[in-house]
Amino acid sequence: MARDAIELTVPGPHGERSVRVSSPTRLIWPEAGITKRELAEYLVAVGDAFIAANGDRPVSLQRFPGGVDGEQFFSKNPPKGAPDWVRAVTVTYPSGRKHPQLVLDEPAAAVWAAQMNTVVFHPWASRAERSDFPDQLRIDLDPQPGTGFAEAVPVAVALRDLLGEVGLTAFVKSSGSRGIHVFAPIEPEHEFLDVRHAVIALGRELERRLPERVTTNWWKEERGDRIFIDYNQANRDRTMAGAYSPRPLPHAPVSCPLEWTELERTDPAEHTIRTVPRRLAERGDPWAGMHDGPGRIDTLLEWWRRDLDDGLGELPFPPDFPKMPGEPTRVQPSRAKKVDDESSG
């Protein structure tokens, strides 16, 4: 063993494992003075809740070899030398290509990922053995310039109530930055495209009720100072930071599950890898038992079909996706208008 390394003992469902962490004094968050060792110890401290939220799912690792101020890359495939207790599952990407992707089943696997300088964990909305069928409806509330977390809070509350109207139970967490993530457990009966359409229908209905606060416009030039419902996060192989995942911002924040009763008074900047373990130990996990009572998206799909009948069609997909049936042109409106003006002139 190299001299600049430690061994961490990590409890788990199969007993204790010893996980080697090299360069433990390397600064991952230089401004906060937080080291690789602290990152690994954080994942030990929140391990059970972290795996309950993110385990048994295909996951992408966002890795920062030189710390959060340096270069980064995403790792999806099992690297050479992975322990035999870290597994993979074959998933299908939007291109149709199939490939194995990592799955984390115990806290030691998260610590092993930290050994590889993983800061952000991006789990799929589906389980490993049914990766084509999401069991979570996820809504990313993305504040636009001129808005922030405070402006997203009343939108999240209205979204919770709207989900309740269609028989879905909403769970909330900070994004770890300026936004808010709202999740609802669902029966894994529909493919990603159907779930995307459910999110679009939900977003459009919320936009009708809060037109001055909410937008589903894909093009930034059309969003204004409103909260964007990022429906494209519901696509296959599109993920957001998992619950309890650290984020690569200077103060080492965490995407932290919250109680609805505390949402309006919380400061997301206070939830960091140094504060969340105590919070979890003292208050418990707000997301415990999330999947005890999954709902269905039938009503949302009825809303989607209703909107189609009313002339509201498909919305743009991310630029790296293949062209999808019914999708509008992927040209921002101002550019399209300029081309039309030049053609007519």
Image (spheres, rainbow, N blue to C red):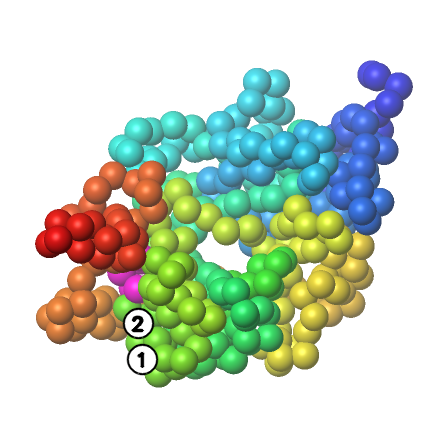
Helix, strand or loop for disc 1: helix
- The answer to whether residue 99 is above or below residue 219 is above
- Residue 158: x %, y % from top left: 45, 80
Magenta portion: prevailing SS class: helix
**From the viewer's perspective, is residue 53 above or below residue 290?**
above
* Tag shown at residue 208: 1
Judge from the rendering whether residue 97 lies leftward or rightward of residue 342; answer left or right.
Answer: right
Amino acid, disc 2? Arg
Residue at 28 percent of width and 34 percent of height: 95
Pick the quarter of the image with the N terminus: top right
Q: Are marks 2 and 1 in contact (CB under 8 Å)?
A: yes
Occupied quadrant, residue 10: top right
Q: Amino acid at mark 1?
A: Arg
What residue span does the magenta drawing correspond to? 193-200
Q: Which residue is mark 2?
A: 204
Q: Is residue 165 left or right of residue 240?
A: left
Q: Residues within 10 Å of mark 2 (few under 14, many from 20)?
A: many
Q: Residue at x 76, y 47 (%)?
A: 42
Image-based side of 177 in relation to 125, left or right = right
Which SS class for mark 2?
helix
- What x and y, as percent, mark residue 29? 76, 43
